[in-house]
Amino acid sequence: MLASAISPRDRMIVALDLPSVKEARAMVDGLGDTVSFYKIGMELTYSGGLPLARELVREGKKVFLDLKLHDIPNTVTRATAQVAELGATFLTVHAYQQTMRAAVAGLGGSKLRLLAVTVLTSYDDADLREAGFALSVRDLVIKRSLQARECGIDGIVLSAEEAEALRPIVGPDVLLVTPGIRPSGFELADQKRVMTPGRAIAAGVDYLVIGRPVTQAKDPKAAAEALLAEIEQAAA
Ligand SMILES: O=c1ccn([C@@H]2O[C@H](COP(=O)(O)O)[C@@H](O)[C@H]2O)c(=O)[nH]1
């Protein structure tokens, strides 16, 4: 689906990085209709977040399970098949060919869409060098994105900094999903490759993942409304 066909509200995915289901539930209730799409990652999954994922799906919200699967193929295939039962929209796997192929094999006939994490947005070129990679962030993102497409993955997780260069390389059908979104003036914290929501939309990103700028705001609903307004304006 082309980005222009996705409603601006659905393009904003709020990361529920909170320590308990109770706090996550309160956040969702407080955000109300402003947010239609939630990401449940490791922190919440390890504190009972999967039943909440089912609940949110039942309530008509979209859910992105950011589990970043990476294991031997048999395990990845079977884990993906389990996740496919939950009714989530997106699941992440790391962008290793063996892992991506195994995840695709676990989809069965489900509607779950797979996203491959190329290079974490907390990494820069120096971090990659330290980890033993010879490629720059940009080149590794490109290489892994092409491999993801070849493996039948639906979309890729990258930083908005790479999105504009990547779109013509991967074509219009691969979803570009970007964490590392920071409204102007918000602290970067552990993120190294960042962009504002408006600039990310202009760079051709399909979905923006936004955590702390909403969840750590004094007024999360007001923060989410401001972010949505910026997205709507950039998408118009
Ligand atoms: O490369 C990646 C992959 C995933 N994430 C996740 O996105 C959110 C970002 O949260 P912020 O608070 O807006 O920084 C978080 O859940 C990460 O696990 C990422 O940041 N980068």
Image: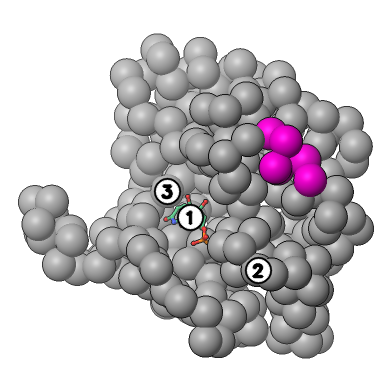
Give residue 95's quadrant in the image: top left
Residue lying at 88% horizontally and 31% vertically, measured from the top left:
58
Residue lying at 51% horizontally and 18% vertically, measured from the top left:
79
Dominant SS in magenta: helix
Would residue 131 be seen by someone viewing this image from the given angle? yes
Name the residue beneath numbered marker 2.
Answer: 217
Q: Earlier in the sequence, mark 2 or mark 3?
A: 3
Circles 2 and 3 in contact, beta carbons < 8 Å? no
Residue range highlighted in magenta: 21-26
Element class at badge 1: strand
The CB of the residue at mark 3 lies under 8 Å from ligand 1: yes
| Residue 134 located left or right of residue 53 | left
Rendered position, 171 above or below 38: below
Give residue 210's quadrant in the image: bottom right
Disc on res. 157: 1
Element class at badge 2: loop
Name the residue beneath numbered marker 3.
Answer: 117
Circles 1 and 3 in contact, beta carbons < 8 Å? yes
Q: Earlier in the sequence, mark 2 or mark 1?
A: 1
Residue lying at 63% horizontally and 35% vertically, measured from the top left:
20
The CB of the residue at mark 1 lies under 8 Å from ligand 1: yes
